[in-house]
Amino acid sequence: MKNDFNQTEAKWQNKWKDCKAFEASDDFTKPKFYGLIEFPYPSGTGMHVGHIKAYSGLEAICRKRRMQGYNVLFPIGFDAFGLPTENSAIKLGIHPRTLTNRNIAKFTEQLNRVGFSFDWSRVVDTTDPDYYKWTQWIFLKMFENGLVFRDTTLVNYCPNCRVVLSNEDSQGGKCDICHSDVIQKSKDVWYLRITAYADKLLQGLDGVDYPANIKQMQENWIGRSAGAFVSFKLSVGEELCIYTTRPDTLFGVTFMVMAPEHPVIEKYAAKIGNMDEIRAYRENCSKKTEFERTQLVKEKTGVKIEGLIAVNPVNGKEIPIYISDYVMMGYGTGAIMAVPAHDERDYEFARKFGIDIIEVIKGGDISNQAYTGDGEMVNSGFLDGLTNKKDSIKKAISALEEKGIGEEGVQYKMKDWAFNRQRYWGEPIPIIYCNKCGMVPVPYDELPLKLPPLENFEPGTDGESPLARIDSFVNCKCPKCGGDARRETDIMPQWAGSSWYFLRYLDPHNDKCFCDTEKMKYWMPVDWYNGGMEHVTRHMIYSRFWHRFLYDIGCVNTPEPYSKRTAQGMILGSDGEKMSKSRGNVVDPLDVVDLYGADVLRTYVLFMGDYGQSAPWSDSSVKGCKRFLDRVADLTEIVSGKGVTPQLERSFHKAVKKVTDDIESMKFNTAIACLMSLTNEIYSVGHLTSDELKVFIKLLSVRAPYLRGNQRAARR
RNA sequence: GCGGGUAUGGCGGAAUCGGCAGACGCGCCGGAUUUAGGAUCCGGUGGGCAACCGUGUGGGUUCAAGUCCCACUACCCGCACCA
């Protein structure tokens, strides 16, 4: 009986399929449970053990909810657009469509073999025109609502992949896809105005059940700071606006700093005495990689702008202006007021360039270092004597607003979402350029704007999408005036399709709208979303943004998409290192299925340690789980009419409670340990009734579903 | 630098409220079975001959601390010249 698991598995897979065991019904009278896992990217290498762990956790919860009588939706789909597929299609010399279909087929087969109880009647594929029609539709809705704009700015650019990357896609200065160094390049870019939703995304965190660290990471990523904008008059007549979180230290300002790329500099080039030096410095900065700028360069550098002087608006003092790369063009206004006495960076800069340091907050020793703590205000006119930071900031802001030289303001670290990619395998951006009418959206009834067939889809060397080479795609008529026009040829980024997929699952075949309202009213929000930590500041932020936008325009009924989020820990290689091909420590989950069966694989990934922590793979521990499941299968041999001892009965009751509770808190490891102990105890007693065996199998079945089927078969 | 986390046998990890530290599994040791190996089953397994000592380090609170408080160390993750 022990080695026929492959047959048993196939048999139950067919049985589950035939009786549609896992299809959710749209019976709105039942209590619902919407369990969501991050749909996979169907790569050519197939499933990773990490997928198994991620899905097995929520799978156990969904199976439990079904037993509890819920109408459970546990869907699956494929997030299939993107560079990895496109790059490997180029390498293999086949079309990304062909490759995607092949990969999806492979994943589907693998997922079925592992026995996940997904509702296969609702599969979505982000590359299906019937799906991306609605991705484009949402984009156009955003366009309509002023959340899409074009701008020429410095952007993250990957020279290797030849694409513009968003901030989220270039964390740590590395390309998220190929990990090469990202450079800064001035480009014309499509943006989604996600910063307009920064406050809503922050506030939304109050009402959802996410672990504290995930909330914190999102808060840090959004990076809200409160302060003030203040205008400084320049000697050339113009006003220079800066952002500061400490307007109360205005009397301590002894110089100003602008980012090297600040437009004011070129504007007054004629009046600046040392433009050559300034341009040379700027040139130098743009060559530095992110790594050099943030890690290596401890020492401050900069150039004084000769012939440009600012006036401190509160005391009329004339102060010099410098450019330095410690001020970023992309944050605040690209210029700062420097208060060396109370800011470490300004202090360092002032020391190096011999600039005055004026104390305005008592409590430190500014001859030694900047003092950033609290204290009594001094040398500060109307602020003198205040001792509380909050009070002094408040008073400073009201004074600035009264005099009309500044106002309260808020800044975010989060930047707008750079949304176009110069490649092929993605959703075409549905915009048309007309000489007369400007940017015109593709009419809704012409969606989906299909990706045209293409022989050679290699990226262009000129920073243009391969789509730009297809005249029949590019040339079109303006929907407004009917004149000759050109299509946008860039595509959307990888994250577009996944920003709303959980809605499409509710109504995957609807061709009238992206999802029926009544269905959303019943199913949303997602009750439990499990996934990886790597998506916390990418997919999670993006999809919350899209969903909140859809809420604001009345298209969905909940402001937040996910009411509860959990994250599984990584599975490391048996050497304790991250699994990677180059280290040769990758475990193929299907090898485990072949060798021991799917139940063993699923039991092991949940037993190997704390679900939320990373843990190394161990082949011999897998065998331990195999032994355990074999021993459970053999329990049938000791079933008799004789009841168990009172003590064992108590253990059964305890196990029911423990397993029930532990699944809820994702402590699968202790739930399984408890069942192992119970197994040992049953064997030492030596017999049990078939009713008791049923209880045992039920407790186990959320993790090892085939076994349950096997036991049922054994009884027939 | 800022934010978050972790630290318990040879290994992964238990310990729900401050109450017998090390559940469960792996590994290892011994035994049974076997021509042998593998597989399986049974028993043992924190350290120390012992008194005793043991949850990263140093203090503290308590009848009682892995758990609470203070100070530190190491490692991991995220952000990072964010004004």
Image: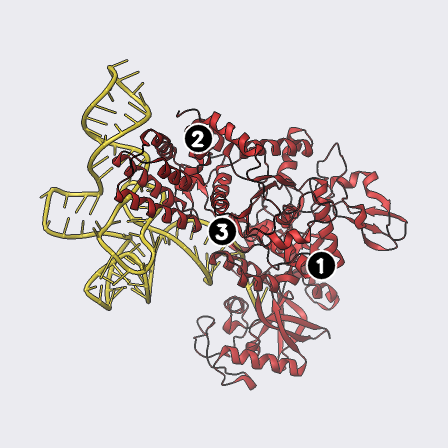
Chain colours: A red, B yellow
Residue B8 in the image: state x and y as whole percent.
29, 48
Q: Identity of the amino acid at label 1?
A: Leu
Q: Quadrant of residue B36?
A: top left
Chain containing mark 2: A
Instruction: Between residue A311 and residue A291, name the one nearer to us.
Output: A291
Q: Dot 1, how many residues are within 10 Å of its Cα: few (below 14), some (14-19), or many (20+)?
A: some
Whether discs 1 and 3 lie on one chain: the answer is yes
- For the residues beneath circles 3 and 2, the answer to whether they share a chain is yes
**Residue A185 in the image: above or below residue B69:** above
Q: Position of residue A119 (x, y in %)?
A: 58, 40
Q: Name the one closer to the observer, A402 or A283.
A: A402
> Which residue is the site of mark 1?
A147
Between A562 and A364, the one nearer to me in the picture: A562
Of badges 3 and 2, nearer the viewer stands 2
The residue marked by circle 1 belongs to what chain?
A: A
Residue on which the image places disc 3: A566
- Secondary structure beneath dot 3 equals strand
Residue A515 in picture, x, y percent from top left: 68, 49
Q: Residue furthest front?
A: A641
Q: Residue at x 31, y 32 (%)?
A: A640
Q: Quadrant of residue A674?
A: top left
Q: In 3D space, how far apart are the residues under numbered discs 2 and 1 (Cα atoms)?
A: 55 Å
Query: Mark 2 sits on what residue?
Result: A710
